[in-house]
Amino acid sequence: MSKSTDELFKNVISHAKEYGFVFPSSEIYDGLSAVYDYGQNGAELKNNIKTYWWKAMVQMHDNIVGIDSAIFMHPKIWKASGHVDGFSDPMIDNKDSKKRYRADQLLEDKIDRYDKDGKTDKAEALQHDMDEALKNEDLPRLKELIIEHDIACPVSGTRNWTDVRQFNLMFSTQMGAVADDADVVYLRPETAQGIFVNYLNVQKSGRMKIPFGIAQIGKAFRNEVIARQFIIRMREFEQMEMQYFVRPGTQKEWFNQWKEARLKWHLALGTDAAKYRYHEHVKLAHYADAAFDIEFNFPFGFKEVEGIHSRTDFDLSQHQKFSGKKLQYFDPEVDPETGKPYGNYIPYVIETSIGLDRMFLLTMISAFEEEDLSTEEKQDSRTVLRLHPCLAPVKAAIFPLTKKDGLPEKAREIMDRLKIDFNIQYEEKDAIGKRYRRQDAIGTPFCITVDHQTLEDDTVTIRYRDTMAQERVASADLDKIIGDQVSWRNLLK
RNA sequence: GCGGAAAUAGCUCAGCUGGUAGAGCAUCAGUUUCCCAAACUGAAGGCCGCGGGUUCGAAUCCCGUUUUCCGCUCCA
């Protein structure tokens, strides 16, 4: 990280706290690791990002509907999805090289080596012992096996191992008042499964025809081994996901379509296109047949903001298997090749999954500017958030030029009218210039000033955040001027 | 989880070799000004992250701990 981008990131974090966007959680108790709260302006900005996404995905597509599923789900769901097995690994660290390994993989490697050396009996014995230990979740036994079979760290070559520890990335809690193993439930580690298990409900009650999508915005929880870089990786985070159900064989086509549509959604906000890139997954997860990330160039490098994954029929098939309920779809459309309907099948799924908190940070970083306004006479600068007007927490601020002569009353009158449609702030404290700068800092696109002339002819000055230019307009026109700029039409058309 | 660095007012930071806390900005009240960081007067705000220890005395030295940042590591 270069010095200037490092500075930028630090400044954005300070700014986010100072102006009520993001606070460390439980700060008066020293904070809670990797958990953050959204403040008064942050909550508005986040809600606006959600609205933009929801409108673009649900409202603009007549074949996509939105749901809101519970965070608690049947524990079997996480067996079916692979999270119980895939999200909890026995790990061991080498104290010399500081490298961490999956204990079972170290043993697997050893088994392979035994096989290669022709020591098949040893290989079989170890395989048996390991399977036994894994089945019983006997972690100390796994370490014994590593010691017994003289396994050394591939990096340091030493046998100086820590104990084997279980890393489970899912948070668990008990359901029901009596603590009992049988009642363990997990906090969902992704929102997608809430969509998959409701796929049939939505399809039937909404009479959805393939292709169709189900969208959801919601919290997910992961007990990350390490969670850092501000709100990039949090233990509690929010996802905006859409699962698009398609006929098998057409997934490639839809995958490409969504890949492009999603990048377009990002770029519509006016963010520098050069900051974005696609990243193709070379090593695919077990459920996917194609995967692209949309990455953004954060001050600390390119990071995933959104993933577009072709998930095949893996999830629905798994749920059909584990639940015993048929999750197939009857497609009455005629296949031109066979002349018969496509009939019953389990749909394939294209997933678009965006991290809301990352999107929030991306938006803050892109908008943040420390602008030098110095002239020959005096030094001057301002901090301005160049947020898209649709996303700005406060749409307009209303100032009486002075605190007397009836100007505050007039200003309040205009505010009372505008606040029905827009989030408006009123300020009369301090000099006008200072009030402008305060609004710049939270990204308010318009400042409206009521002066003595307003009392005579009902005109006001409107000052634009980005250019700092002022214009005198009729107060009656404000609704339209602001309305045009903050209309979702600007992003969705 | 390992290694390194840091933590002092809302923010940015100063505080020397130990002697019970300071600046700028921000906040609040008032006076004055009135279209781009104005001035003046006053006020509030800190158990110096937390807990131990050394000492007559600790923001300062030592140990532990929490949180944050950086590098590994991890990342469905």
Image (cartoon, grey):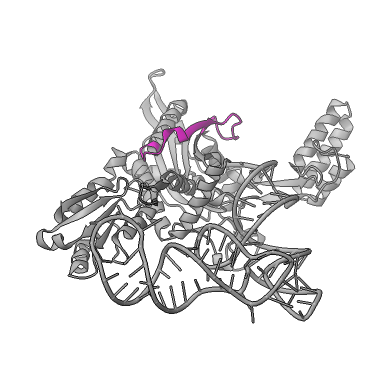
Q: Is residue A291 magenta?
A: yes
Nearest the eye: A132 or A370: A370
- Determine the residue located farthest toward the top in the rendered image: A337
A176 to A281, vertically: above or below:
below
Q: Is residue A320 left or right of residue B6?
A: left
Q: Tell me where residue A101 sits by quadrant.
A: top right
Which residues are the magenta region?
A267-293
Nearest the eye: A451 or A27: A451
Give the total of numbered labels.
0
Residue A219 appears in the picture as rendered: no
Q: Position of residue A356 (x, y in %)?
A: 46, 48
Residue A315 appears in the picture as rendered: yes
Q: Is residue B1 left or right of residue A148?
A: left
| Image quadrant where one finds the C terminus of chain A | top left
Nearest the eye: A143 or B15: B15
Q: Is residue A437 left or right of residue A400?
A: right
| Residue appearing at x 63%, y 47% in the figure | A84
- Determine the residue located farthest toward the left in the rendered image: A457
Nearest the eye: A26 or A92: A26
| Image quadrant where one finds the N terminus of chain A | top right
A317 to A47, vertically: above or below:
above
Q: Position of residue A375 (x, y in %)?
A: 35, 47
A356 to A455, vertically: above or below:
above
Q: Position of residue A66 (x, y in %)?
A: 38, 47
Q: Is residue A63 magenta?
A: no
- Determine the residue located farthest toward the front in the rendered image: A377
| Residue appearing at x 16%, y 51% in the figure | A473
Q: Position of residue A110 (x, y in %)?
A: 82, 34
Q: Is residue B69 left or right of residue A312?
A: right
